[in-house]
Structures are given as C-alpha cells and as structure tokens.
C-alpha cells in the first residue's frame, strides 16, 4: 500500500521482519530501466578527460612553484656571494644570473625559462635578492 504525500506516492514503511518481494511491482527499491543501462559509463567517459586535465594543470602549477622557489634560493646565494666578493656561479641549469652593485647594495636577479610541455607556451620565472655588500 502506498501513501500519497502531495503529488507523489511513497511506499509505506514495512513492518520489521517483512522482506521485499521483487515479483510485486513497486515492492523492491532498485529498479533499473532500459534507459539507465550504461549511463555510468557515459558519465565516466565525459568526466574522465576533465579530471585528467585538472590533474595535469595542478602538476604543472606545482612544478612552476618549485621552480620559483629554486630561483629564490639561487638569487639569495648569488647575492650573498657577490656581497662577500666571491665569484657567482649559476646554481641551476638554464638559469641566467645577473648581479648589479649600487653603492653598498648588491642585487642578484635570476631568470629561468619554464616550459610546461604539451605544446603550451613557456614563460619566464624571475627572482631577485638583495644583500648588503661586506666591507673589504
């Protein structure tokens, strides 16, 4: 027996111990129609490329952030070396380090070209560090 609530009919709760009978229409909970067959596969086929793209974008962003942190480290070491009067060595392959001195301030700038791959255009990641020149 069904209970009518508003415009919808809801099955009445079964007493404890009564089992649902799949041979009686409306008595079992899960009813697969012909239209529902394969819908999960179709939804997965639509969502999976979007999830892969999201994962790839996240990994590229993490790689770019790691490169930025490496640039900051290289710029810091270059500024400290130049402030002491030591030669400046590039700390990362492909990095261009430029050092300028303005009075008693040494400024080191590191530029690295980041190419995410996949045919996407690259961009430059830059970091600058400043140190006080040590007296000689």
Image: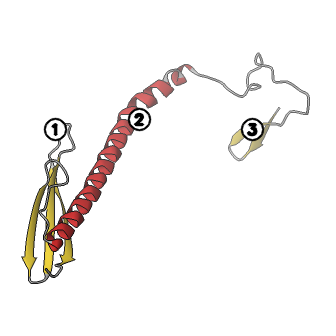
Q: Secondary structure at mark 3?
A: strand
User: Alpha-carbon neighbours of circle 2 within 10 Å: few (<14), some, or many (≥20)?
Assistant: few
Measured from the top left, where is residue 61 in percent x and y?
30, 50
Measured from the top left, where is residue 107 in percent x and y?
14, 73
| Residue placed most toward the observer, 14 or 76 | 76
Report, in whole angstroms, how far the alpha carbon at label 2 lies from the one at label 1.
Answer: 23 Å
Residue under label 2, please give it: 47
- Relative horizontal placement of residue 9, taking residue 45 as reference (left or right): right
Q: Secondary structure at mark 2?
A: helix
**Colour scheme:** secondary structure
| Residue displayed at 11% across by 63% down | 87
Q: Secondary structure at mark 1?
A: loop
| Contact? badges 2 and 1 (CB < 8 Å) | no
Residue under label 3, please give it: 10
Report, in whole angstroms, how far the alpha carbon at label 2 lies from the one at label 3.
Answer: 33 Å
Which badge, 2 or 3, comes first in the chain's sequence?
Answer: 3
Mark 2 or 3, closer to the camera: 2
Location of residue 116 with respect to 40 vertically, above or below: below
| Residue displayed at 49% across by 21% down | 38
Point out which mark residue 119 bears.
Answer: 1
- Relative horizontal placement of residue 77, taking residue 34 as reference (left or right): left
| Residue displayed at 20% across by 39% down | 117
């Amino acid at each position: 027996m069904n209970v009518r609530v508003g415009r919808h009919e809801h099955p009445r709760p079964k007493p404890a111990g009564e089992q649902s009978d799949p041979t009686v229409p409306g008595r079992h909970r899960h009813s697969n129609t012909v239209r529902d067959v394969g819908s999960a596969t179709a939804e997965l086929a639509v969502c999976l490329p979007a999830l892969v793209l999201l994962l790839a974008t996240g990994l590229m962003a993490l790689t770019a952030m790691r490169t930025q942190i490496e640039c900051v480290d290289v710029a810091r070491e270059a500024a400290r070396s130049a402030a002491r009067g030591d030669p400046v060595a590039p700390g990362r392959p492909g990095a261009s380090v430029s050092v300028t001195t303005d009075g008693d301030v040494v400024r080191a700038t590191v530029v690295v070209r980041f190419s995410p791959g996949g045919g996407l255009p690259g961009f430059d990641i830059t970091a600058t560090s400043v140190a006080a020149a040590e007296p000689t």
